[in-house]
Image (tube, grey):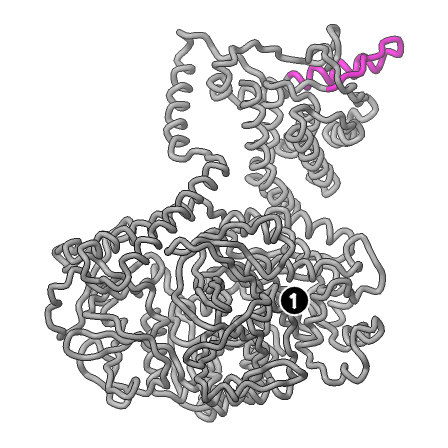
Amino acid sequence: MEDEIIHGFIEESWENLGQLDVDIVAFEKDTSNDELLAGVFRTIHTIKGTCGFIGLVRIGAVSHAAENVLGKMRDHSIPRTPEAITYILEAVDAIKELLQGLEATGEEPCLDHTALIDCLERVAHPEAESASLELEPTACGSEAPVQQEIGGENSTVPTAIVTVDSENLLTASGEVDFDALDRAINEAAARHREKMQNQAAKPQQQPAPAIPAPVGQVVSQPKGGSQDKSDDAKDAGEKKSVSDLSIRVSVEVLDQLMNLVGELVLARNQLIQLSRGDEASKYAAPLAHLNRITTDLQEGVMKTRMQPIGNAWNKLPRLVRDLSKVTGKPIELEMQGAETELDRTVLDAIKDPLTHMVRNSADHGLESPRDRLAAGKPETGTIRLNAYHEGGHVIICIEDDGAGINTEKVLNKLISQGLVSEADAEKLSEYEIHQYIFRAGFSTAEQVSSVSGRGVGMDVVRTEIERIGGMVDLISRRGLGTTVRIKIPLTLAIVSALVVESGGQSFAIPQLGIMELVLLTAEERNRIERVHDKQVYRLRNRLLPLVRLSDVLQIEAPPTSDGNTNIVVVQVGEEQMGLLVDHVFDTEEIVVKPVGLLLKEINIYQGTTILGDGRVIMILDVSGIASEFGSLNTSQVDRESSSDQERATNADLISLLVFDTGEQTMAVPLSLVSRLEEFPRHSIERSSNGHVIQYRGSLLPLQSIEGAPAQGIAELQPVIVFSDGEQSMGLMVAAIRDVVEEQLTISVQSKRPGLLGTAVINGQATEVINTQHYLLRTNPDWFRKSHPVHYRILVINSSAFFRQLLTTALRSEQYLTVAVDSVESALNHLEKDSAFDLVIVDFDQPEIQSGELIIWLREQQATASVSILGLCSRLTPHLEQDASRAGCHAVLEKLDITELTQAIERLCGPSHWNRGVSA
């Protein structure tokens, strides 16, 4: 029973202490905030009170001393000075240190915190400093009773010795009257202080040294007590009913549950494999139902493992505070999106990288106060953390408003350290120079300090992030600051993967890093070239390094029967690479299992998995393959020219989902689609508002295409699901046909409800549906905001289709939108009216490539602080870097309306740090 209580105390204390650093640092910035102070006091008070119950003397002594200071601050008896707050933080560190020892050994470690307790006592009792108690550390291993260990039988320290039946311990602790307890502590402390002062006045009387015993153990009243007791019991019962809404579950239980769900996913995959090719089977509908339930169960279990990223940020305010004092730089830390959730495994993996980056921003990124004032900046530097969901990933941005990276200084350091020759240095682009910051052992610090300068940190960041399948991007603007952008998966337990074959063996590649698939026929294989003795393929006029998977694995790969070559284009950091494989199969949701001990040192494998047909295959780590076999660095000139040609080639090139309605073929932009489902037709029900189906714990409204014939008698009903935040609706169709990429041009405008017009797709006239029509038909208030903000937005796009689509979407979000078809029209409009919060620019337009509009906006005083958002058909890291260099705040892919509105709120909101900063 005692071990369980101590274990519960340790667990609860770590939870409380995790938030304590954040609250204390926040209180230091606003010492008038009594609510923050009260929260800190309650946490320390709880720790101290529990220590008294279970006999943890050392933790109780430190927390008791800290509680005295906090209580005096709360009562305004002593000033709330930085010195006092520093001692409170040191007390928290001491409690953490003692807790770590207790957790490791089951006993309190023998650590001497007498000096700290003395300091806290002097702060709490400045008027009686001369008579402060002298505390002695207690010897380890003493088996004396707690009372004797504290001060002996004749101790004058006020104590409350309580005997409570262990079975009723938790019940008794729930009935403590903390107000009465506070009064008792204060009265006892006052009597004791007065007595000690009287003793101090008599030289012949010397007080015995003692450690203050924690006060606060209260015996519960016997049955048949007063009316107050019954009221308290009633209140306790009400509180208990609230606490019953949540329970604490061991992580081991969740891990075991996740493993069982993984096994269920494998069994589901096997059943789907067995039924593949027999859609008319009587098992098709039950299998579809099982598939849906398994997916829902998987997502539900994943939610139990999700934790807010704020749990990884809790120690950062304290870190920034300490760095501010060490470096002598006033630093403000702002955190947004702390509620963004991640799988616990991913969260643990990013804690150290985040610490490295924040430390780097404070030491290298931000200038000294003198330099900032000379540059016309506020004396206080700002580091901002921002986290948000984007697709199936989480994006974390670490921004600072410092001096940015001194490219020339970095280059000189590279040459002096012999990392590059002077001849090669002239060929390096700014982007390539900045990438050396992630190299192990490289540092621009003039001297090694306690903060940084040893050349470790940023290489750890990239290694750790890529190890979990993420990517790191660094964008720096001289004089304005640096942004590090991290893209990481939501979870590592169950992932979607592409199954490929090389040399007769199958392998899985996580779909997170796959950009596209390229098929070269036997006649097209001569397009593979060799540069610097490496194979490359010019994909859309840009060199793509190629690595043959059979060469990596050192296995024989006989030529394919059809002579075709498959290229899997993967993203590795900020570069792309092509894996040459023999065959490409289907995508599957796979359960990631760790590799065996014999393969742990081979970094080309990420794990193992079991396919639906029962085969065990290896999961490839594309980052490990790239680091093992290298990649090709193309010149900046080639990159820029290729990027320009790519934009011209891909103007308005978007992915479209093609489907049948029974009489005709229609299409919808794929980026608007949330999921594709097949529901058993008998599961669809009728309501007063139309058809609905039970879907993921709620009812999913279903709509039919305007004018489409009634659906047939097939057992399964294909449904296209559209989602926006908490709202979802399904569009019933006859069949899903294909996903294609086309330059979408509306040839014939349509007046028919629910249609934008007709376009030629795959050589066939195809109707393009207007999704907003069906969303509003489902819920007329779909796009209505509870607190609309009427930002003024200027849209520049030469395509009539995209102008109409963007304008309709933005106006439905209640943004005040003006759309023009050219840069010239935009310039004319802005000269007359420049009062816009945001300008949306289409980077696929040839006239926008030079960034002339962005440069013009930056040069004009009236528009220098206007946020700029770029749109493109295919977003690449190089395009994002070019846009940022020109002065664009963000770049998104077209037609993702949800992401677009989120970006608008981030860019136009009052908290955006780039507002008011001119390039």
Quarter holding residue 301: top left
80 vs 211, nearest the viewer? 211
Q: Where is residue 156 drawn, in percent x and y?
A: 73, 11
| Left or right of 11 on screen, residue 728 | left
Quarter holding residue 663: bottom left
Q: Secondary structure at mark 1?
A: helix
Structural crowding at the residue carrying mark 1, measured as other residues with C-alpha within 10 Å and reported as few (<14), some (14–19) or many (≥20): few
Residue that appears at 38% across and 79% down = 654
Quarter holding residue 398: bottom right
Q: Where is residue 158 drawn, in percent x and y?
A: 68, 13
919 vs 475, nearest the viewer? 475
Residue 832 appears in the picture as rendered: no
Q: Where is residue 526 drawn, in percent x and y?
A: 52, 88
Q: Quadrant of the C terminus?
A: bottom right
Is 15 rendered above or below residue 49? below
Q: Is residue 201 magenta?
A: yes
Residue that appears at 29% across and 64% down = 676
| Left or right of 728 on screen, residue 327 | right
Residue extent of the magenta highlight: 188-211
154 vs 700, nearest the viewer? 700
Q: Where is residue 482 drawn, in percent x and y?
A: 65, 68
Is 757 rendered above or below residue 811? below
Q: Amino acid at mark 1?
A: Glu
Residue that appears at 54% across and 85% down = 528
* Tag 1 residue: 628
Q: Is residue 684 magenta?
A: no
